[in-house]
Amino acid sequence: MMDELLAWRKEFPILDRTVYLISHSLGAMPARTREYLAAYAETWATRGIRAWEEGWWEMPVRTGDLIGAIIGAGAAEVVMQPNVSVCQSIVLSCFDWTGKRNKIVTDDLNFPSNLYIYQGAERTGARLITVCSADGITTPVERMLAAIDEETQLVSVSHVIFRSSYLQDLLAITRRAHEVGAKVVADIYHSAGTVPLNVRELGVDFATGGSVKWLCGGPGAGYLYIQRELWPELKPRVTGWVAHKAPFAFDPAAMDYAEDAFRFLNGTPAIPALYAARAGYEIIGEVGVERIRAKSIRQTTRLIELAQEAGFAVRSPLKACERGGTVVIDVPRGGEIVQELSRRDVLVDYRPGAGIRVAPHFYSKDEELELVIREIRNCTGRGPAAGSR
Ligand SMILES: Cc1ncc(COP(=O)(O)O)c(C=O)c1O
């Protein structure tokens, strides 16, 4: 069957010379990114300070609109931030942790950055409840639901777990949280761009993510969605002059937050990163996440078959409906093997306690799946003679 998504390969120069199965870590750079970065340099060089009023100032929200279209947020509801760690810190700083409702419920498969930030909140009165996974792959939803109670202020989960690619039941978790009056922050870094999602339909209060992975947008372009109805009541302590209603008044008196999404910004935005990220969002928007997901399910299913045929343990959910875009394959000496594969221009990565993470994206060829498993077999001595391609 013709794979029409392969037509996009010409937009990604690295695919000509590399087997690129690492979009869960760093998505391939679109050719257009070079032009957009050149436009940034040209604007700065020729327009100078006028660039701020000619577009740069609005960029954190205008760029956020491109993400909003991918994740189901409304216009001007997503603001760009440098990274997820900053976004999560902003979210936490919206709450007071000294009252009776002071629990943060999360799970130990959440991304460590998020957990470190919640540990910090314990110093200001938060009680951190961490639901532990029994198998290191999944966190059973019933255990999450049982941990959420009337003393819970915030529930934090990753939509797709970075370590195993397990897809959490965000809808059930959000419903339970709202039943008891708690809010939900979803880290959608590993779903946005590969698993269809709609933040409004899911009803999450906050969503955080970045552009390095499936969105092919490069570093420095994190994003924060906050449900609009909550804005008036939220006054983040992690803030700055850009979040002020009248930033250019430089008023040293008490903070007066902007009424729009600017209230969740802080200091000068990372403008070059926003230029760099644009091409990825445009392409993901044009391809469409539904089509990306359909291909991803087909290819990750095939990868699992190939890995199992080779006798490797798979440390991702086997059911497609419980899995994001990555397949984790546990083999001895995984770290060394990944280095050897890189020398052979096959890019995947390794996470301790998990295994080798392999991720096809919409631009991947079926032959590349066969090839990566063959290479891993070669390296582990379970395949044809080492070096054959
Ligand atoms: C699910 C998830 N959240 C957060 C992060 C870290 O994001 P940042 O470096 O933007 O803070 C990662 C990075 O791999 C991740 O996988």
Image (spheres, helix red, strand yellow):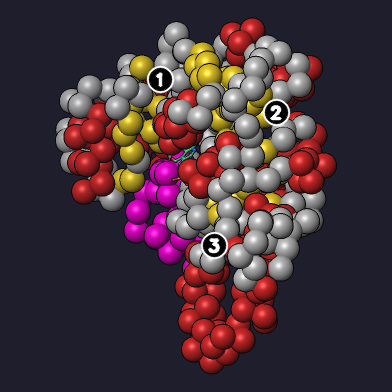
Instruction: Find residue 183 and name its label.
Output: 2
**Residue 251, image quadrant:** bottom right
Q: In front: 380, or 328? A: 328
In whole angstroms, how far apart are the C-alphas of marks 2 and 3? 26 Å
Q: Which residue position holds label 1?
A: 314
Nearest the viewer among 118 and 208 is 118
**Hey, what amino acid is under mark 3?**
Gly
Q: Secondary structure at mark 3?
A: loop
Q: Is mark 3 within 8 Å of ligand 1?
A: no
Looking at the image, the residue that sits furthest to the right is 229
User: SS at mark 1?
Assistant: strand
**Is residue 25 found inside the magenta-colored segment of the image?**
yes
Q: Earlier in the sequence, mark 2 or mark 1?
A: 2
Sequence-wise first label, 3 or 1: 3
Give residue 55's position: percent from left, percent from top: 66, 76
In what quadrant of the picture does the C terminus appear? top left
Q: Is residue 351 left or right of residue 33?
A: left
Picture quadrant of residue 196 = top right
- In the image, residue 155 lies at what x, y percent? 62, 24
| Depth order, front residue of 41/351 | 41
From where the camera sits, is residue 205 visible? yes
Residue type pointed to by label 1: Val
Indicate the position of residue 14 as horizontal and vertical percent values: 39, 60
Residue shown at 20%/26% (left/top)? Answer: 333
Q: Which mark is residue 267?
A: 3
The magenta span reads 4-33
> Where is residue 328 drawn, in percent x and y?
40, 27
Give the left or right position of residue 135, taking residue 62 as reference. Answer: left
Q: Residue at x 47, y 57 (%)?
A: 220
Secondary structure at numbered mark 2: strand
Based on the picture, tell me whether residue 312 belongs to the magenta stretch: no
